[in-house]
């Protein structure tokens, strides 16, 4: 084959993801949407706060939340840690990474059923804040000291609610009130299972703030992996069997904590109630 024709042919290969820049020989693609004013980037060991979105390649969102965590050294090309290390504070970007890499290597669990094996997925990241480990620990200590009175107020409100509703049971060790209202006969939940749930969330005054039932859109996620659900819901689902329906009452440290929800719907230090219906549990063996 003529060498000129070969070069021309290679150069004319279609770009698989128009608008995205490739690094690591195809392991990672990214596109910046917004530049932060200060080009201060994160390093391994820093604590980052970010709004994170997981999407399928057809832009279907299956996770959206704000998380704060400590960055670790990337263990393979195209890892999600690499995505964060490419960004400066206040940058917003979209990434295309290996779904098998995120779930299989980083999260050590199976792919959700709606993502094919050996395929890619999209991750949206808005990097809100970067703090060194020293600054993060100092600010956390100062903040916890400052909000001590707020925590006591929430405990008073929650105690009054429990008394008024005559909830005659003891909380779990974590502080969750767990009430089974309908028993199922299916399998129990184990780490790595793909679970499908319907849930409705409301404040202690009875006002609803979220409902998969009203959206007619049950929520599916991999049980036991990070960044999927709030800790109180994960604890509750781990106590359930397929077909169970339960009501849980969560203090804020098992729900949205001292910061509230990233959407602003749930204020800081707010106890909440969820009704959860565990619709389906699919184990690793079921996926083979």
Image: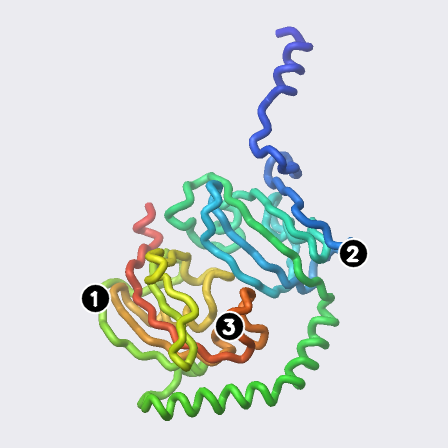
Residue where numbered disc 1 is placed: 185
Mark 2 vs mark 1, foreground winner is 2
Calculate the distance from the C-alpha at mark 2 to the C-alpha at mark 1. Answer: 56 Å
- Does dot 2 land on a helix, a strand or a loop? loop
Residue 66 % position (x, y): 57, 63
| Of the image marks 2 and 1, the number of the one nearer the N terminus | 2
Residue 102 % position (x, y): 52, 50
Residue 69 % position (x, y): 61, 64
- Does 130 appear above or below 121? below
| Of the image marks 2 and 3, the number of the one nearer the N terminus | 2
| Rendered residue at 61%/87% (across/down) | 148
Mark 2 vs mark 3, foreground winner is 3
| Rendered residue at 58%/25% (across/down) | 14
**On the rendered image, what quadrant is the C terminus found in?**
top left
Q: Residues within 10 Å of mark 3 (few under 14, many from 20)?
A: many
184 horizontally vs 114: left or right: left
Residue 276 % position (x, y): 33, 69
| Rendered residue at 53%/61% (across/down) | 65
**On the rendered image, what quadrant is the N terminus found in?**
top right
Residue where numbered disc 2 is placed: 38
Of 174 and 29, the residue lying toward us: 29
Residue where numbered disc 3 is placed: 266
Calculate the distance from the C-alpha at mark 2 to the C-alpha at mark 3. Answer: 30 Å
- Does 229 appear above or below 140? above
- Does dot 3 land on a helix, a strand or a loop? loop
Mark 1 vs mark 3, foreground winner is 3
- Does 262 appear above or below 31? below
Of 169 and 125, the residue lying toward us: 125
């Amino acid at each position: 084959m003529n060498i000129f024709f070969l070069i021309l042919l290679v150069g004319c290969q279609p770009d698989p993801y128009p608008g995205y820049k490739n690094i690591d020989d195809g392991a990672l693609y990214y596109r910046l949407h917004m530049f932060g004013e200060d080009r201060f980037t994160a390093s391994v060991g820093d604590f980052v706060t970010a709004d994170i979105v997981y999407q399928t390649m057809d832009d279907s969102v299956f996770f959206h939340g704000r998380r704060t965590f400590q960055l670790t050294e990337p263990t393979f090309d195209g890892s999600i840690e690499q995505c964060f290390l490419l960004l400066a504070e206040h940058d917003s970007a979209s990434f295309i990474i290996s779904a098998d890499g995120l779930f299989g290597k980083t999260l050590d669990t199976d792919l959700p059923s709606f993502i094919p094996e050996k395929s890619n997925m999209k991750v949206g990241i808005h990097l809100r804040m970067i703090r060194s480990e020293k600054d993060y620990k100092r600010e956390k200590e100062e903040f916890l000291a400052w909000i001590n009175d707020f925590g006591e107020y929430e405990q008073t409100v929650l105690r009054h609610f429990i008394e008024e509703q005559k909830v005659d049971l003891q909380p779990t060790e974590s502080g969750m009130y767990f009430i089974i209202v309908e028993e199922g006969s299916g399998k129990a939940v184990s780490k790595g299972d793909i679970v499908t749930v319907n849930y409705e969330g409301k404040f202690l005054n009875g006002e609803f703030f979220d409902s998969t039932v009203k959206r007619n859109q049950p929520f599916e996620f991999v049980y036991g992996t990070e960044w999927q659900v709030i800790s109180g819901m994960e604890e509750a689902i781990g106590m359930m069997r397929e077909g169970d329906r339960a009501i849980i009452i969560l203090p804020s440290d098992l729900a949205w904590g001292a910061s509230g929800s990233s959407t602003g719907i749930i204020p800081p230090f707010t106890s909440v109630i969820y009704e959860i219906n565990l619709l389906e549990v699919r184990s690793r063996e079921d996926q083979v």
